[in-house]
C-alpha cells in the first residue's frame, strides 16, 4: 500500500490490486453471515443483520460487490473481466482462512476481528487522496464506493466495539478478541504481500488473472 500512496504503481499494478482485492470484498458478507449463524444473542443478530444488509447493497447502500465493480470499471477493468477474474493463490488462501475462522470460532471472536476497521477510515482517506493525486486516469466516479464506506464506518465501528465490550467480559475473552483483530491485520498483510510479489517483483502479466 505504501507504493500506492506514493504514486509508484503502474496502471497494470493498480488494476492487479483491484482485481485481487475484489476477492476479499465479495467474501466479507459471507464472513459476516457466518458470524450471524453462530450467534445466539438476539440483540447482536439484529445489529449484525444491518451490517450485512449494507454490505450486500440493501437499504440504499452501494454494497461491497457492486461498489468494487464500479471502482474497477473506473480504473479500466471491465465488469465482466473482474466478475470472472481469478485471484492469486496467496490471496485466496488468506481470505478463505478468514471466512473459515468466522465459521469455526466463537462468534465474539468473529465480531472482534472487525475491530481492525477502526483504522480503515484513515486508510480510506489516504487512498482517495492518493488516487486523485497520483492516478488521474482513474475516473472520479469510482470513488463513490469509498465515500459511501466513509459514511458508514463510524457507526459500524461503534457497534462492533459495543458488542465486544459487552460480551467479552473475562480477561481470556478479551485477549482472544485482540488476537482476532490482529489476525485480520495479518490477512491484509498476506494479501498485499502476494500481490506485491506477483506484480511488482515478478512483473506478471495482468492477463494471468483475467484468463478466468
Image (tube, rainbow, N blue to C red):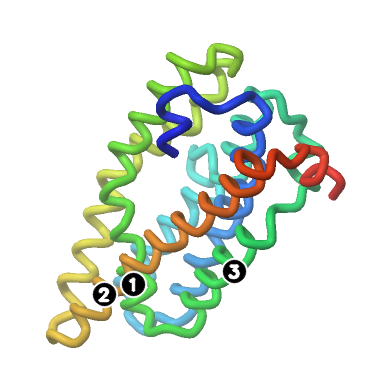
- Determine the secondary structure under disc 2: helix
- Picture quarter containing residue 154? top left
Q: Residue at x 30, y 39 (%)?
A: 121
What residue is pinned by disc 2? 177
Q: Are the two marked residues, 2 and 1, in contact with CB atoms closer than 8 angstroms?
A: yes
Left or right side of 184 for 156: left
Q: Which residue sits furthest right?
A: 211
Label 1 vs label 3: CA separation?
15 Å
Left or right side of 33 for 199: right
Residue 114 x %, y %? 35, 61
Left or right side of 65 for 59: left
Q: Are the two marked residues, 2 and 3, in contact with CB atoms closer than 8 angstroms?
A: no
Residue 150 x %, y %? 35, 35
Residue 5 x %, y %? 41, 29
Q: Is residue 6 above or below residue 163?
A: above
Residue 47 x %, y %? 34, 63
Label 3 environment density (alpha carbons within 10 Å; few <14, some 14–19, many ≥20): some
What residue is pinned by disc 3? 96
Q: Which residue sits furthest front?
A: 201
What residue is pinned by disc 1? 180
Return the residue nearer the eye: 183 or 12.
Answer: 12
The N terminus lies in quadrant: top left
Q: Is residue 205 above or below residue 12?
A: below
- Determine the secondary structure under disc 1: helix
Amino acid at each position: 500500500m505504501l507504493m500506492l500512496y506514493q504514486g509508484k504503481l503502474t496502471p497494470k499494478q493498480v488494476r492487479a490490486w483491484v482485481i485481487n482485492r475484489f476477492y476479499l470484498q465479495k467474501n466479507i458478507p459471507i464472513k459476516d453471515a457466518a458470524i450471524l449463524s453462530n450467534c445466539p444473542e438476539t440483540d447482536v443478530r439484529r445489529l449484525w443483520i444491518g451490517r450485512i444488509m449494507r454490505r450486500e447493497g440493501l437499504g440504499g447502500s452501494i454494497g461491497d460487490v457492486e461498489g468494487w465493480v464500479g471502482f474497477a470499471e473506473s480504473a479500466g477493468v471491465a465488469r465482466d473481466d473482474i466478475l470472472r477474474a481469478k485471484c492469486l493463490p496467496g490471496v485466496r488462501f488468506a481470505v478463505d482462512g478468514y471466512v473459515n475462522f468466522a465459521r469455526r470460532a466463537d462468534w465474539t471472536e468473529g465480531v472482534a476481528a472487525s475491530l481492525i476497521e477502526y483504522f480503515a477510515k484513515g486508510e480510506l482517506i489516504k487512498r482517495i487522496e492518493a488516487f486523485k493525486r497520483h492516478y488521474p486516469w482513474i475516473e472520479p466516479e469510482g470513488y463513490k464506493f469509498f465515500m459511501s464506506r466513509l459514511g458508514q464506518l463510524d457507526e459500524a465501528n461503534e457497534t462492533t466495539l459495543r458488542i465486544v465490550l459487552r460480551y467479552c467480559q473475562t480477561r481470556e475473552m478479551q485477549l482472544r478478541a485482540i488476537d482476532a483483530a490482529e489476525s485480520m491485520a495479518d490477512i491484509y498483510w498476506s494479501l498485499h504481500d502476494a500481490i506485491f510479489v506477483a506484480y511488482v517483483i515478478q512483473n506478471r502479466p495482468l492477463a494471468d488473472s483475467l484468463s478466468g
